[in-house]
Amino acid sequence: MIFLIKKVRVFAPEDLGIKDILIAGGQIEHIAKDIELEGEHVNVIDGQGKIAIPGLVDSLVHFSGGGGEGGFHTRTPEMHLTEAICGGVTTLIGALGTDATTRTHTDLLAKSRGLENEGLSTFCYTGSYQLPVRTLTENITDDIVNVDKFIGVGEVAISDHRSSQPTISELARVASESRIGGMLSGKAGVVCIHVGDSDTHLDLLFKVVQQSDIPATQFYPTHINRNQQLLDAGIQWAKSGGYIDFTTSTNEQFIEDGEIPAAEAVALCLQQGVNKTNITMSSDGNASLPVFDENGNLIGLEVGKVKSLFDSFKQLIQKHNVSIDLAVTVVSTNSANILKLPQKGRLAPSVDADLLLLDDESLDLQWVFAKGKVMMDNGVVTIRGTFE
Ligand code: ZN
């Protein structure tokens, strides 16, 4: 299928102005003014009144299910294809969560390949919340070098009662094995760090960087908007060269308890002079979100939504007056760069045709292309998951 999108405002993420975009063979073929191409195989889309941005890159999704902290019945379900499509997410990185006992890497990889068969681009983290990490083969390095889908390690939990309370040397070792795996295979080899709500915040990461040869950029800490103190520590971490990731899945109770909405956290960081390339957002999709009553009793569970990433992207622009190009950088380009995915996170010739068309006023999602295939056409989902 060949698509020619005419007269669309292109954010690549930088604002390229009004251009035509030619999509062929699953890739972006050309972006220029007035591309002329005719023929029965050319589908022309009127891009007037629309903006084109790269598909979102969600660096943490429990797409094979997560949760389980309230017993077996609280294990969250797998993600369906359309949950990603409706949120404009075309690249997802899957991970195990708290549970690396009933959840396995083989299952994670199978779900990852299933989503790929259905049209998305997926990658995975090896490892687990707890150390010593679970791996598929002998160790982290072998996993990253030998298994195409593994691009790093995560989520490894710190500052959390559910973590294995890792020591400086334990965490440094995980990071070094991941780093070597990344170097040998040309992958990112980053360590995605789940940061919990204990008041040690990012202390362990600072210590590992101080006391070892591991650079701050080897770590990719997430949930940094969990509370104001953690956000402050995150800003300090980012100013010393590290990356910080904010989680968009939330509920009213989390916000009442002090969580900062991801978009607000990004806006705060930008105001405080954090380098824009060090900030990202991810959905933490399909994680469990517990709901408690006023006495602290668990009264229900919700499931994190991948679509929250797109909602937070809109909030960045509509509520916090962040420019479109900068908002795109935060939800797509930065994560693609940190995860070393050169085919993702931007609109340019020869990259994968992961592309979204949004209404230029409402920013509502209208079209989704994933590797050149139409997944949403004028607001209507065209491809559903196998069991949807
Ligand atoms: Zn987590």
Image: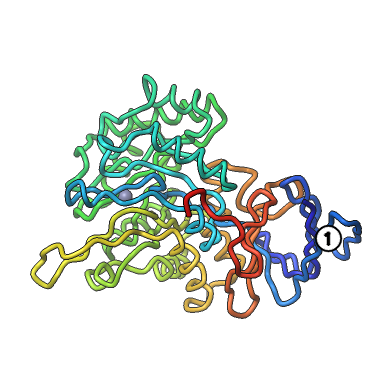
Above or below — where is 385 with respect to 112? Answer: below
**Residue at the disc numbered 1:** 32
- The x, y position of residue 122, in whole percent, is 52, 43
- The x, y position of residue 229, in whole percent, is 26, 62
Q: Amino acid at mark 1?
A: Ala
**Hey, which quadrant is residue 231 in on the image?**
bottom left
Instruction: Say left or right for 235 vs 348.
Output: left
- The x, y position of residue 273, in whole percent, is 47, 64
Instruction: Say left or right for 359 vs 191.
Output: right
- The x, y position of residue 343, in whole percent, is 65, 44
Q: Residues within 10 Å of mark 1 (few under 14, many from 20)?
A: some
Instruction: Residue at the far left: name it.
Output: 295
Q: Residue at x 20, y 49 (%)?
A: 69
Disc 1 secondary structure class: strand
Q: Residue at x 14, y 70 (%)?
A: 293
Above or below — where is 345 with respect to 269? Answer: above
Which is more toward the observer, 82 or 250? 82
Respond yes or no on whether mark 1 lies under 8 Å from ligand 1: no
**Colour mode of the rendering:** rainbow
